[in-house]
Amino acid sequence: MYKKWLTVLLSALMVFVLSACSAQQAQNQEEEDTGADGGKVNLRMVWWGSQERHDATLKVLDLYKEKNPNVTFETEFSGWEGYWDKLATQSAAQNAPDIIQMDAQYLQEYATRNQLADLSEGISIEDMDETLADSGKVNDKLYAVPLGNNAFGLVYNKAAFEKLGVAAPEAGWTWDDMFALARDVQPKLEDGKYAIRDFTYDPGVYEMYQLSKGKGHLTTEDGEFNIDKETWKEWISTFEQLRNEGVASPAEMTVAEVEYDPKGDLLLTDAVLIKQSFAAQFPSYDSVKPGAYGLVKAPGDVEAGGYLKPSMFWSVSESSKQKEEAKKFIDFFINDPEAAEILGVSRGLPVSNQILDSMSEGFTDSDKAQLELVNKTAEDAQPFNGGPQGWGDFQNNAYRQVGEQLMFGVIEPDQAFEELKSQYEEIKGR
């Protein structure tokens, strides 16, 4: 009798366990596909950018919610500073937002660590240039969808040049032209104002310089360190001279800059006349002082110094339980005409050729400046290189730290170069 009841009890327990597992599997599937039948969906999103970009993005989210009443959004947005540290912490804890604004310099790192979902299916990219679409791929899988076409150049205070009676920079200029212009205009400026921002700790501007000298990108295609020592020392020496002459911004001023902040950006506060900018960042300046600024193609030398790149991407976290709904939103974001009208060029020129064609007739002067920079750069653009795993960490931390030491005179160029090389190898090996 005891054995009989034991058998019945064990059988009942097994049924209960199997039922519970089936229920949990059903719940998990429901959580994953909750948007498929109109169930409530909450998407967490994170991005960086200016206030203009924040406002435009929020309006697109409102439009999406109107068309998809079952969807709500939980948003996090900030400036560039601190964005990647926070995302790294969230990702390590498997708590990353569903939709992540991604940058080329971090794409390899997040994709190879299996922190991003494969977006090869569910998002229409047929109307996007193939080269641009492929920029979001790692090992032939699409992990990031480009949001804008972009080019790196320089932004300058057009109104100030006009007031001083000095010819503004023009496409086709060289680096020597830029340095000569800065020296020529400096005597005309008030005390505490400088012709040019110090680019010592900015790897993006130096990369344009090295490219123009025919020395290639800062890393090779297979991820090897490729900063040319003599070219780099020449660059560092030039800016040391400009600082000493009072032409480039002092170290204390440069490191304290808060970019795109009307009270902290060196261009917006009239502290400098020339600094670096991507085309996609130009609205951050023009929206503060409409018509006051201009964009110009990167200087050249024996070769062109500029290149085209995706302005930024949307990616989906691999840990997201709302992957399909997240992909549906991204498809809407890049392909819906109403969304495109709201966004304008706040993330660069639209990636859909059809949308770009339809919008270009109504472009503002600011929009046209972006388009002109991209088109001018495209004429002789260098190939794009997003950098290997760890490249973002190297650029934003190691390179900047070594650059600051140089600007404050606490390290010599030869020692600084070896430190850069050592830190690159360490970061690459993590």
Image: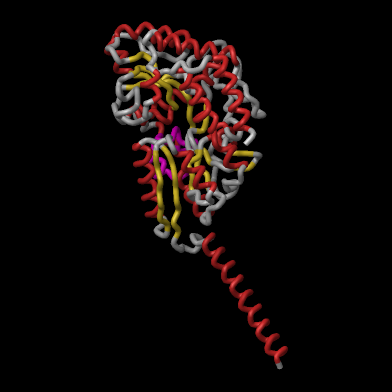
337 within the magenta span: yes
Q: Position of residue 386 (x, y in %)?
A: 57, 31
Confirm whether residue 352 shows in the render: no
Where does the N terminus fall, quadrant-wise? bottom right
| Image point (57%, 13%), residue name | 231
In percent of width and height, residue 361 lies at 38, 31
Query: Residue 309 at x, y = what percent?
Result: 52, 30
Q: Is residue 143 left or right of residue 56?
A: right
Q: Is residue 76 left or right of residue 313?
A: left
Q: Quadrant of residue 424?
A: top right
**Residue numbers of the magenta segment:** 335-355
Residue situated furthest bottom in the rendering: 1
Up the image or down, 282 lies above or below 301; here it is below
Residue 112: image quadrant is top right
Residue at (45% x, 13% y) in the render? 239
Number of labels in the image equals: 0
Residue 104 position, x and y percent, is: 54, 34
Residue shown at 47%/35% (left/top)? 148
> Is residue 416 part of the magenta span, yes or no?
no
Q: Is residue 1 above or below residue 406?
A: below
